[in-house]
Each structure stands twice: as structure tokens, then as C-alpha cells.
Image (cartoon, rainbow, N blue to C red):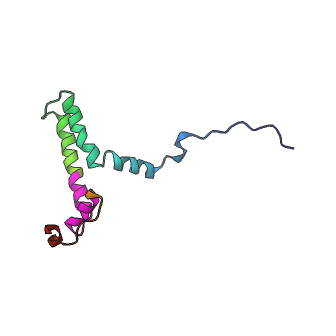
Amino acid sequence: MAGPPQPYQGTLAFDNFDIDLVLKVASHTILSPFFTFFVPFMYKGMGAPWTAPTVYYPSAWFLFVTVICTLLAPLPESGFASLIVLAGRALPKTFEQVQK
């Protein structure tokens, strides 16, 4: 026979909080060129001039992150490889087949 039901033992929200989680969130926000592109425009939209530090420093950070990501990103083998990804279908193998 089973005893009385045990009360629910909840866990803390920070049980799974570790450095991997912090790096994953940072890579999608403050270390992402896509995210950092919009930060200066948010400040500009609130009325800050282009020369204000709140617009200037995030713009510089965006350029820095973009340059680093560009230097570290692997280059495609050919230009057609990126076109296949964008078009979503296979393209002709040679330029002559495109002309036909």
C-alpha cells in the first residue's frame, strides 16, 4: 500500500543556468551582426543625433562585430553555392547552360 502523496518539490529556475546558456544567448544578441544592426537605429528613432555617443558607440560595435564575423565565416566554394541556398533549387552547372 502506498503512503500519502508527497508534496510537489519544485526546482529553481536557475538550476540549468550555466556558461553555455550565456554564450548561446550572447551569440544571438550582442555578438550577432543582425541584432547589433538595429541598436543604433532604435536610438536614432528616439531622437538622438548621429553624433551622440548612444548612436556612435553601438554603430562602432556593429562594425566591429560584422568585421569579426566576416573574417571568421567560411567562404563558399563558388558563387553558385550561395545562389542555390537563396533560390531554394538547383541551378545549371555551367554558365553555357544558362545562356541556352
Measured along the vertical axis of the image, is residue 14 above or below residue 44? Answer: below
Residue at 83% from the left image edge and 43% from the top image edge: 2
Q: Residue furthest front?
A: 100
Q: Is residue 83 visible?
A: yes
Q: Which residue is depicted at the point 68% across and 37% down? A: 8
Which span is picked out in magenta? Answer: 66-85
Check residue 67 for magenta coloring. yes
Q: Quadrant of the C terminus?
A: bottom left
| Residue 12, x across and y down, in percent | 57, 40
The part of the image, by quadrant, that contains residue 56 is top left
96 vs 36, left or right, is: left
92 within the magenta span: no
What residue appears at the point 18 percent right and 45 percent down from the top-left corner?
Answer: 60
Quick one: quadrant of the N terminus? top right
Dominant secondary-structure state across the stretch colored magenta = helix
Compared across the picture, whether 92 is left or right of 12 comes to: left
Name the image quarter holding residue 7. top right
Residue 57 is situated, as x and y percent measured from the top left of the image, at 20, 40
Residue 75 can be seen, yes or no: no
Front residue (pair 56, 47):
47
